[in-house]
Amino acid sequence: MAAVGLMALAKSTSHFELAGSAQRKYVEAVHMVNSALESPTESLEDSTLMAVISLGVFEEISDYKSWVIHVQGAAALLVARGKEQFSSPMALKLFNQVRTDLITACVNENNPVPEDVLALQDEGKGHQDVSSSFWQIGLVGARCAKLLTNFKGYNIEIVSDLLYEANTLEQEFGIFGQLLSLEEPYSTIQDTAGRPDLICHGRIGVYEDMWAIRIWNNWRNLLMIVCRVKLFLLNEILMNALAPDNVGQTKLQLRDTMQLLAQLGEGILATLPQAMKFQVTTYEDQTWNDGASGLSSVASAYLLAGRLSVVGQSEATNGETRQWIIQRLTDISKSARIPTALKIIEAIKGVDVQ
């Protein structure tokens, strides 16, 4: 939408007149969407939901808490649209988009996915179009949010139950990861372009399109959450001698979980060159085209900052990689003027000294 583009440009250039124009466009768009939502027929149309999703991008750039509220509103709209939306490929994509955002918000806020959304999700199981890995990953993602909610009430008596659920989720993520490999295959090549500002440790992921990158990183992000919960629980078992007869097995699980967590982080970082438009011109020949740097786009910079935050705060990320991430976030802060980048840096530094 025009408001989103204007706000991104205004933030990247500190152009206050543009910011005013963006705000006016945003208010106009909100009024239009509200009018559509008041109509029993227009409120259920794909175009209305698409407008709500677009306005959510504006909220994400402007204020995270407002974005969470916006996503909750979009989820309520999904429920109002009912099970008929699963019969339309476009409507199903919109459902997946909102559900992904909702799971992200729930995970960040340590809240479960709302029961009415889960009930609607159950109604979609009988439709042929929901057999894709993206749909299945969303199902497991909702359970990941529930795991975090249960983890919020952690006490030593429920370690075994939490670890069992985390192990189950890890296995299911692995199954759907194999399915995703068939649906959205990718390759990893070594850097020959000499761009350390965009390429970490010389690894470049080559994907069919941005949609594939989004799905893969959604899968990686959720599995990293499960792994981090497992790390905590396994360390608790060792420190409190909760499994004295299985110390060796517990240490082996701990090592394997750290390795998986490191691999997932490397996979996310390897997607950044293509995601930031320093990309292959074709999937087959792997010829690189130095397009416009993603740091010149506020929307792209926000995306990059989010990815860097996840990997930077991971227990399996080594000091050298953290320093690379901190430098990239510093670049983002200077070029795109995003305050969030500085907050992420402080959070990463906090992890680094522990």
Image (cartoon, grey):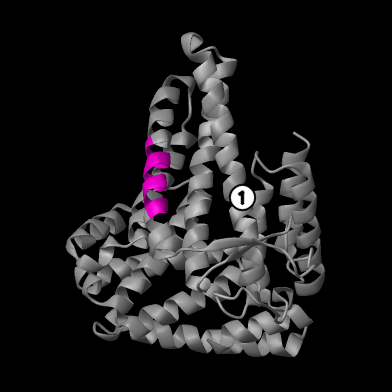
Where 160 falls versus 215 (above or below)? above
- Residue 273 falls in which quadrant of the image? bottom right
Front-lying residue, 199 or 342: 199
Magenta residue check for 174: yes
- Residue 91 falls in which quadrant of the image? bottom left
Where is residue 117 drawn, in percent x and y? 30, 58
Front-lying residue, 331 or 183: 183
Chief secondary structure of the magenta portion? helix
- The answer to whether one can see residue 306 in this image is no
Which stretch appears magenta? 168-178
Where is residue 120 drawn, in percent x and y? 24, 60
Front-lying residue, 266 or 221: 266
Name the side, left or right, on which 257 lies relative to 294: left
- The answer to whether one can see residue 157 in this image is yes
Write down the residue under mark 1: 265
Magenta residue check for 86: no
Residue pictured at 36% horizontal, 44% vertical = 172
Q: Give the amino acid type for the residue marked by disc 1 in the picture.
A: Gly
Where 191 falls versus 50 (above or below)? above
Residue pictured at 24% horizontal, 82% vertical = 40
